Image: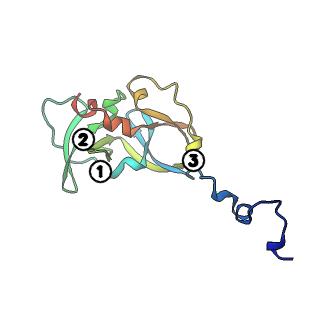
């Protein structure tokens, strides 16, 4: 007897052999970069990152909010530099130390100064936890908590952060 002769009870043979084809699967994982920002640890979604550079030469500009450090040259493009710790009211990033996260969304590109950018973490979107306890300015920009081996860290909503004019204008 061949498989064609098998009684499938009215079921189409293709449906019996490939039942997962019809159901869209959840993305296996997303990626984030784990960073130190001020006195805390945060996760930054990889999809907004255009690069990670050493926090080196920054040219200061007058009459800008305290968190706008100035501008820097990133591969031939002048980019504004924002001290993310100062913007989020988490302290300051020491000038010339740490990393610049070159981030972009829409037409805006900004270099976010952070104390350190250490590891890339893969996580399934279904593993995200609610961030109800995160308050203050930070709370406006936290999308969820990402579980790690040791704890859970706030996942920044960089889309919202980069779209906010307060970031660059005050």
Dot 3: element: loop
Which of the pair 143/60 is nearer the observer? Answer: 143
Total numbered labels placed on residues in the image: 3
Which of the pair 148/163 is nearer the observer? Answer: 163
Closer to the observer: label 1 or label 3?
3
Marks 2 and 3, the one that precedes in the sequence = 2
Q: Where residue 1 appears, x then y in whole percent?
A: 87, 77
Residue picked out by circle 3: 124
Q: In this view, does 69 lie to the left or right of 142?
A: left
Which of the pair 158/13 is nearer the observer? Answer: 13
Residue displayed at 34% across by 41% down? 114
Q: How far apart are marks 2 and 3 (CA)?
A: 31 Å
Q: Distance between the residues labelled 2 and 1?
A: 12 Å
Quarter the C terminus occupies: top left
Residue picked out by circle 2: 81
Residue displayed at 24% across by 48% down? 56
Q: Where residue 130 appears, x then y in whole percent?
A: 55, 31
Residue displayed at 41% across by 40% down? 36
Marks 2 and 1, the one that precedes in the sequence = 1
Closer to the observer: label 2 or label 1?
2
Q: Is residue 72 left or right of residue 21?
A: left
Q: Distance between the residues labelled 1 and 3?
A: 30 Å
Which of the pair 94/30 is nearer the observer? Answer: 30
Residue 54, numbered circle: 1
**Residue placed furthest toward the right:** 1
Closer to the observer: label 2 or label 3?
3
């Amino acid at each position: 007897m061949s498989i064609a002769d098998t009684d499938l009870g009215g079921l189409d043979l293709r449906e019996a052999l490939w039942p997962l084809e019809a159901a869209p699967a959840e993305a296996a994982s997303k990626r984030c970069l784990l960073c130190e920002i001020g006195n805390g640890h945060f996760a930054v979604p990889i999809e907004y990152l255009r690069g990670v550079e050493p926090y080196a030469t920054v040219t200061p500009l007058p009459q800008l909010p305290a968190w706008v450090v100035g501008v820097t040259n990133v591969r031939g493009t002048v980019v504004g530099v924002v001290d993310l710790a100062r913007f989020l009211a988490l302290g300051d990033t020491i000038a010339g130390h740490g990393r610049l996260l070159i981030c972009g969304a829409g037409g805006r590109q900004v270099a976010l100064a952070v104390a350190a950018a250490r590891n890339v973490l893969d996580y399934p979107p279904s593993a995200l936890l609610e961030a109800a306890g995160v308050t203050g300015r930070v709370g406006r920009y936290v999308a969820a908590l990402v579980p790690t081996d040791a704890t859970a860290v706030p996942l920044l909503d960089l889309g919202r952060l980069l779209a906010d004019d307060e970031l660059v204008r005050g």
